[in-house]
């Protein structure tokens, strides 16, 4: 009987420990994307790191003001920040974020800023999918709206697989797809609109 009581107490303690440990483990995995990164030293591209108290947020299972910065395989500088981020407890390699704010400084000197209401993060594949009222602004003068933008953080490629609306040099444009890639021949960053492109041309005075 004494042995049965001792086993019961051990099991209860294990359950209590796991209730605290599992959220902390999930938060730790989430922080590998947002908090463990190569710090950008370029003063024109860097954004201050937000201080995050993981212990304070363990019960809520979220991180406030997470931030990630680094360099892609092609040398582009990337920075992602959010209002908050929450790990997926069923799949530790995935997480979600709210009020995403991202920036890519390309090696050709161009820049793209992106914002969205929410984002889904695939930590394993280094992909962030921005969702809901996505706004994309390029240093070339294009202001683009979409409902989804897939950002490949490893190489800096961007893809909007749905309808996009753009205003900028030359007029207003609507297309079914947008890709932002680096031209392998010239090294320049290219915005490629495709699938039912419609342009309302506005000549520049």
Image: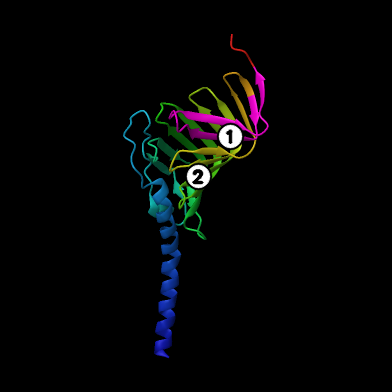
Position of residue 115 measured from the top left corner of the image (x, y, whole percent)? 52, 35
At 50% from the left edge and 48% from the top edge, which residue is drawn? 121
Q: Quadrant of the N terminus?
A: bottom left
At 45% from the left edge and 59% from the top edge, which residue is drawn? 23
Name the image colouring. rainbow
Position of residue 116 measured from the top left corner of the image (x, y, whole percent)? 55, 38
How far apart are labels 2 and 1 at the CA level? 16 Å
Above or below, comparing residue 172 to residue 1 in the picture:
above
Position of residue 18 measured from the top left corner of the image (x, y, whole percent)? 43, 67
In this view, the residue farthest toward the left is: 41
Which residue bears the numbered disc 1?
Answer: 178
Q: Main secondary structure of the magenta part?
A: strand
The image quarter containing residue 74 is top left
Please report whichever mark, 2 or 1, sits nearer to the chain's N-terminal start: 2
> Which class describes the residues within 10 Å of circle 1: few (<14), some (14-19), or many (20+)?
many
Start-end of magenta stretch = 173-201
The number of numbered badges drawn on the structure is: 2
- Asked if residue 196 lies in the magenta stretch, the reply is yes
| Label 1 residue SS | strand
Q: Is residue 154 left or right of residue 168?
A: left
Q: Is residue 176 left or right of residue 74?
A: right
The image quarter containing residue 27 is bottom left
> Which class describes the residues within 10 Å of circle 2: few (<14), some (14-19), or many (20+)?
many
Above or below, comparing residue 58 to residue 183 in the picture:
below
Which residue bears the numbered disc 2?
Answer: 128
In this view, the residue farthest toward the front is: 185
Position of residue 127 measured from the top left corner of the image (x, y, whole percent)? 49, 46
Q: Quadrant of the C terminus?
A: top right
- Asked if residue 168 lies in the magenta stretch, the reply is no
From the viewer's perspective, is the residue at label 2 or at label 1 nearer?
A: 1
Q: Is residue 63 left or right of residue 132?
A: left
């Amino acid at each position: 009987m004494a042995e049965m009581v001792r086993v019961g107490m051990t099991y209860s303690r294990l359950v209590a420990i796991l209730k605290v440990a599992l959220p902390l483990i999930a938060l730790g995995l989430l922080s590998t994307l947002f908090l463990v990164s190569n710090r950008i030293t370029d003063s024109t591209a860097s954004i201050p790191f937000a201080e995050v108290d993981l212990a304070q947020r363990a019960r809520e299972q979220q991180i406030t003001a997470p931030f990630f910065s680094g360099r892609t395989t092609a040398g582009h500088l990337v920075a992602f920040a959010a209002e908050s981020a929450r790990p997926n407890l069923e799949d530790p390699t995935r997480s979600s974020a709210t009020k995403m704010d991202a920036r890519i400084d390309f090696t050709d000197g161009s820049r793209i800023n992106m914002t969205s209401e929410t984002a889904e993060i695939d930590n394993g594949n280094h992909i962030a999918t921005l969702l809901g009222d996505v706004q994309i602004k390029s240093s070339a003068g294009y202001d683009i709206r979409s409902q989804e933008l897939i950002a490949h953080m490893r190489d800096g490629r961007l893809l909007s697989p749905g309808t996009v609306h753009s205003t900028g040099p030359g007029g207003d444009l609507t297309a079914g797809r947008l890709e932002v890639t680096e031209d392998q021949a010239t090294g320049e960053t290219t915005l490629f609109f495709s699938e039912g492109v419609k342009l309302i041309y506005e000549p520049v005075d």
